[in-house]
Amino acid sequence: MYKVTLTKKCFSSLTRLKKDDLISNDELIIIRAWISEMKKFGTGYIESCGHWNDHKLSGKRDDERASSFSNSGRIIYRVKINKTEISIIRITPDHNYS
């Protein structure tokens, strides 16, 4: 079992996105499914599963990865050194990595 957490900044941002109707209830369900699969199966599964279109980021985000939850929405996360803890650092509805 893996531990998945949202940073405080990510949680606040996600709350704002929902309040402003920038993320739908259906998208929240998909994000919860991603979290559930990550908790159960870990990064290897998410990376190899074509459904999530998971990929390594580069540049200033070199130690981070992103998974798709919609055509443009992304879950940006970092895997901790022990590889069993995943920290979601940003959820964006518009493919914006900044």
Image (tube, helix red, strand yellow):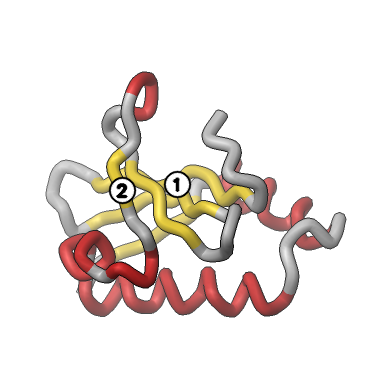
Q: From the image, which quarter does the N terminus lie in?
A: bottom left
- Residue 64 image offset from top left, x and y in percent: 33, 38
Quadrant in the picture for residue 86: bottom left
Around disc 1, counting alpha carbons within 10 Å, would you say few (fewer than 14), some (14 to 19), or many (20 or more)?
many
Q: Is residue 52 left or right of residue 97?
A: left
Numbered badge on residue 76: 1
Which residue is painted at 58% across and 47% down in the image? 10
Q: Nearer the viewer, residue 41 or 57?
A: 57
* Circle 1: residue type: Ile
Q: Secondary structure at mark 1?
A: strand
Numbered badge on residue 44: none
User: Would you say the residues marked 1 and 2 are in contact, meaning their CB atoms lie under 8 Å apart?
Assistant: no
Which residue is painted at 30% across and 64% down in the image? 3
Q: Is residue 25 left or right of residue 10?
A: right
Give the alpha-carbon distance from disc 1 to disc 2, as whole Å.
10 Å
Q: Nearer the viewer, residue 96 or 12?
A: 96
Closest to the camera, between mark 1 and mark 2, is 2
* Circle 2: residue type: His
Q: Which residue is tagged 2?
A: 55
Q: Is residue 37 left or right of residue 19?
A: left
